[in-house]
Image (tube, rainbow, N blue to C red):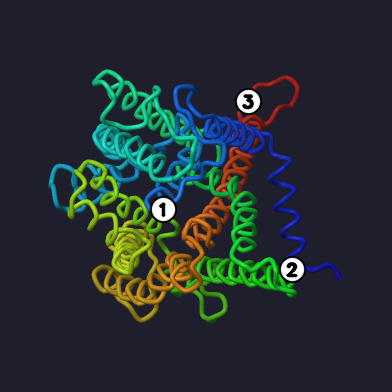
């Protein structure tokens, strides 16, 4: 007998990939991601990198993640969407009743959302200029301290003090333009393709670097083991298997927190009232209701001290920022942990919005059994959401900092150890993409069916060929 779940899955799969609208949306998304990844692999012509160059350090790794891999090659997209994400954080915080006019915009629906998006784009500019300068200073500093005979040069200069004002302005404009192009590509994917464009840009960079990172990790493990030992090959193999096992364990935990759901039973007044528990509808709230957004937001915030450090002279203040406020230090890991938890709480309430949900329940005649509509429903949803976050948010933060804990224990550089942040983005981004594809298929199928019904029943009533009358 055919399994019902498998049948349902294959029917859904067939419906998706036989729908011309979904196929065209997927094609647009794929083409834009390929274009983005292609540009990200091309070093700008006036930048010279060593043949064995590899960006290293927690600040560089996090910037490269937010740039979708563009920083590793110093491409046009070297700054990526990091400044835009930072601007989004700031605008969302300010529109949460901190600034009344912005709070009113947030409650105006689509029109208010567009206004806030314009403010976000404008706010992106200063952050982009700051991070562009920080990227240039960081890349030249890493080149001078790498110890390689072949250094890094930009416009033929190996130090930022050698640049003229025009050259610095040109670099800032080029990288700023690259950021706005990334945001534009993300917008097209969100509106014309499938999924969240910004998340998919970051996801594409992570996926593209998986094989090179694993290969580099294997060579790193080889270099740390004594080649003259009789058990050299066995030791290398076992060490690498342990490394991959850690990858699988973190991946399983990330899938777990994205799959667990807390179901709140919901009743319907009138004829929709259910008398059996198994027939009740429910409101699903995931263990990780905010998805991948807290990790991306926290990653963007943790790059701010490193960005500021690039503007400071070589003194104690700069070294404090670089030594203590990075993910290679216990202080940096603690801050990253706290940021993920805070953003998980904040963004889950933005996503679920208990007040709005309680209002919708009251208008539609729905209620939670044993809970009054209105304020009591809002309090109940808020209480459930808080309990879920106290479990899910620390779980998410532990997965994100796991590679840096591994680095402390094993000595593997954090850029080579398994990226918990990257795994969370891969899992959450992939699930979000699949749900977006299914949603696009359902919406498109509904529109096609509706169009057929209208075309069938909107024939003229006096048709001589026996046509049907109008439906409405």
Instruction: Determine which quarter of the picture holds residue 82.
Output: top left
The residue sitting at 38% across, 73% down in the picture is 394
Depicted 12 relative to depicted 39: above or below:
below
Does residue 138 appear to the left or right of 19 in the view shown?
left
Tell me the number on the disc at residue 233: 2
Residue position for label 3: 461
Q: Earlier in the sequence, mark 1 or mark 2?
A: 1
Q: Do the residues labelled 1 and 3 touch (CB within 8 Å)?
A: no
Does residue 287 appear to the left or right of 378 in the view shown?
right
Q: Which is nearer the eye, 222 or 169? A: 222
Q: Which of marks 1 and 2 is in front?
A: 2
State the count of labels.
3
User: From mark 1 to mark 2, how far is it between C-alphas?
Assistant: 29 Å
Residue 159 at what x, y percent from top left? 32, 32
Q: Which is nearer the eye, 161 or 289? A: 161
Tell me, yes or no, if residue 283 can be seen here.
no
Q: Which of marks 1 and 3 is nearer the N terminus?
A: 1
Depicted 195 relative to depicted 241: above or below:
above
- At mark 1, the secondary structure is loop
Residue 318 at what x, y percent from top left? 22, 51
Disc 2 packing (10 Å; few <14; some 14–19; many ≥20): few
Q: Which of marks 3 and 2 is nearer the N terminus?
A: 2
Residue position for label 1: 57
Residue 214 at what x, y percent from top left? 62, 56
User: From mark 3 to mark 2, how far is it between C-alphas?
Assistant: 84 Å
Q: Which is nearer the eye, 92 or 281? A: 92
Residue furthest front in the image: 228
- At mark 3, the secondary structure is loop
The residue sitting at 69% across, 21% down in the picture is 463
């Amino acid at each position: 007998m055919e399994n019902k779940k498998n049948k349902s899955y294959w029917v859904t799969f067939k419906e998706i990939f036989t729908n011309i609208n979904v196929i065209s949306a997927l094609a647009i998304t794929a083409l834009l991601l390929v274009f983005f990844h292609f540009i990200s692999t091309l070093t700008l012509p006036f930048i010279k990198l060593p043949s064995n160059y590899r960006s290293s350090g927690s600040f560089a790794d996090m910037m490269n993640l937010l740039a979708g891999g563009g920083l590793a090659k110093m491409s046009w997209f070297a700054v990526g969407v990091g400044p835009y994400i930072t601007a989004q954080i700031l605008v969302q915080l300010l529109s949460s009743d901190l600034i009344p006019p912005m709070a009113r915009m947030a409650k105006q629906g689509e029109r208010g959302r567009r206004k806030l998006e314009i403010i976000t784009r404008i706010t992106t500019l200063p952050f982009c200029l700051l991070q562009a300068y920080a990227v240039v200073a960081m890349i030249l500093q890493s080149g001078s301290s790498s110890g390689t005979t072949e250094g890094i040069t930009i416009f033929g200069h190996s130090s930022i003090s050698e640049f003229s004002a025009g050259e610095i302005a040109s670099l800032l404009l080029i990288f700023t333009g690259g950021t706005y192009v990334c945001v534009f590509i993300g917008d097209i994917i969100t509106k014309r393709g499938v999924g969240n464009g910004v998340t998919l840009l970051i996801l594409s960079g992570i996926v593209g670097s998986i094989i090179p990172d694993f290969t580099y990790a294997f060579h790193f493990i080889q270099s740390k083991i004594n080649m003259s030992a009789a058990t050299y090959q066995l030791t290398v193999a076992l060490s690498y298997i342990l490394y991959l096992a850690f990858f699988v364990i973190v991946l399983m935990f990330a899938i777990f927190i994205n799959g667990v759901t807390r179901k709140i039973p919901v009743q319907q007044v009138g004829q929709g009232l259910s008398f059996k528990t198994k027939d009740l509808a429910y409101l699903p709230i995931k263990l990780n209701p905010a998805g991948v957004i807290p990790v991306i937001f926290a990653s963007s915030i943790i790059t701010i001290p490193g960005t500021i450090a690039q503007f400071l002279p070589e003194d104690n203040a700069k070294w404090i920022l670089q030594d203590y406020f990075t993910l290679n230090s216990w202080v940096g890991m603690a801050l990253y942990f706290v940021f993920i938890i805070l953003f998980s709480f904040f963004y889950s309430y933005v996503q679920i919005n208990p007040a709005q949900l309680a209002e919708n329940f009251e208008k539609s005649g729905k209620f939670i059994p044993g809970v009054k509509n209105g304020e009591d429903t809002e309090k109940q949803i808020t209480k459930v959401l808080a309990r879920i976050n106290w479990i899910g948010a620390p779980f998410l933060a532990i997965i994100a900092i796991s590679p840096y804990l591994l680095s402390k224990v094993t000595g593997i550089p954090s850029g080579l150890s398994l990226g918990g942040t990257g795994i969370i983005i891969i899992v959450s981004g992939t699930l979000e993409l699949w749900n977006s594809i299914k949603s696009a298929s359902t919406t498109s199928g509904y529109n096609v069916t509706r169009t057929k019904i209208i075309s069938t029943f909107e024939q003229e009533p006096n048709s001589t060929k026996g046509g049907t009358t109008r439906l409405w």
